[in-house]
Every structure is written in structure tokens, then in C-alpha cells.
Amino acid sequence: EDQVTQSPEALRLQEGESSSLNCSYTVSGLRGLFWYRQDPGKGPEFLFTLYSAGEEKEKERLKATLTKKESFLHITAPKPEDSATYLCAVQAVGNAGKSTFGDGTTLTVKP
Amino acid sequence: NAGVTQTPKFRVLKTGQSMTLLCAQDMNHEYMYWYRQDPGMGLRLIHYSVGEGTTAKGEVPDGYNVSRLKKQNFLLGLESAAPSQTSVYFCASMRTNSYNEQFFGPGTRLTVL
């Protein structure tokens, strides 16, 4: 059974204070690892897909990396508008695109 | 494009009542999914569909039924609502090419009293 564990559950940062969110996973044949952002009262919004160990993707202040066991979402010099819940999900090969989600990390960035 | 839309946005039911949640997508996606999200938890898959006329069970299917009569629509039904079904329900769709992300609707907040 595929499993995704995210840590920490909550993270509070001062504006400009860089940090990382962790996503540990076990999956029977990784098809892709996905990061989503979810704002309160809204549906998740896609950020990145990582396919293989060693891959990195960047978007503004966010950088996602992938190893064979975990993924990190690095946030550099965060701003208050980066406050949201970040969800990690994995898709296994041959699984009809079904995604297994972690419980998320809620990030709060204070000015 | 409207993307993925969900109807209604909010609903309050009494125990034992029935209702149908509607999901519509205008991106011509083959795959569609229904999830529920409870406080402090991630998304759990209820049912999914890989094409018009097909449905399959996900991780937590009990108490729910689905139908995909048209490619663009995916309906989630609760035949006899229970308080344990109080949750936020999200619909998602996805293209069938490899390595694709899911596109989510805005959610339906359901309360069962």
C-alpha cells in the first residue's frame, strides 16, 4: 500500500526566514510525485511534478527536490502570501492515475 | 475555460436524507475523481472513473455511489446520509497522458446533522 507522510504538520516562519517541508513516501513503482498548494476554503492547486530521484523543479521562491525515499519543498525568503497548506501526493505506475496524498503541512509566514 | 466546477458549494442534510453532488469539467479529461477531506487530513479517494460509463471504488467508498453518464460530468450520491459523512468533498480531473497532475474543483462543504 502506498503511503505518504508529511512533516512538520505546521510551520510558522518570519518573512524572509527560509525553511523546508518534508514528504516521505513508499510506493510500488513511482510514476510521479506531486506538490500542491491549498488555500483555506479552496481546492488544491498544482505546483510541481517530480518523476525521478535527483530531479529538481523551481517556481519563484519554491524549489522541490526528490530522492528515492522523500521529497523536500524548499521555501526561500518566504512572504506572507506563501501562507497555505502544502500537500504532497504520489502516483504509482499502472494505477489509473490515482494519487495518495499526505496530510499536508500548514505554513504560516508572519510579516 | 471554467476548469472543474462543483455544485452545490454548501449543503446541510439531516441524517437519512439523500443528495447528489455534481462535478463538471470542460477540459475533455478522461479521468475524474471524488475525494473527501476532513480537518487536518489529506485527501482520501472515494470513487474514480477512467472514462465515460466506467466507475471504480477508491479508498473509502462505503455509503457513496457514483455515475459517469457523460464524459464531462461525474456525480457523487449519498443515499442515506450519516453524520460521519460530514466533510469537504473535492472533485478532480486529469488527462490520460503520462505523469499528469490533477485539476481540482472548489469543493462542496457538506454537514450532516
Image (cartoon, coloured by chain):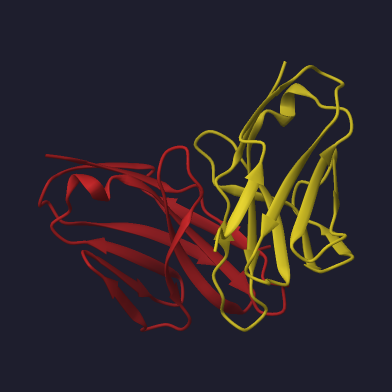
Residue found 67% across the figure and 65% down from its top: A98
Chain shown red: that is: A
* B72 to the left or right of A80: right
Residue found 68% across the figure and 72% down from its top: B28
Viewport quadrant of the N terminus of chain B: bottom right
Give the number of marks: 0
The image position of residue A6, as x and y in percent, is: 44, 53
* A109 to the left or right of A43: left
Hey, which residue is sitting farthest front in the picture? B1
Viewport quadrant of the C terminus of chain B: top right
The image position of residue A64, as x and y in percent, is: 33, 70
* B87 to the left or right of A6: right
Q: Quadrant of residue B72?
A: bottom right
Nearest the eye: B70 or A35: B70
The image position of residue B99, as x and y in percent, is: 56, 79
Residue found 65% across the figure and 49% down from its top: B44
Q: In this view, does B72 lie above or below B82?
A: below
Q: Quadrant of residue B21?
A: top right
Nearest the eye: A94 or B6: B6
Q: In this view, does B14 lie above or below B100?
A: above
Q: Is residue A98 above or below residue A17?
A: below
Q: In which quarter of the image is residue B86?
A: top right
Chain B tint as drawn: yellow
Nearest the eye: A31 or B81: B81
The image position of residue B5, as x and y in percent, is: 62, 51
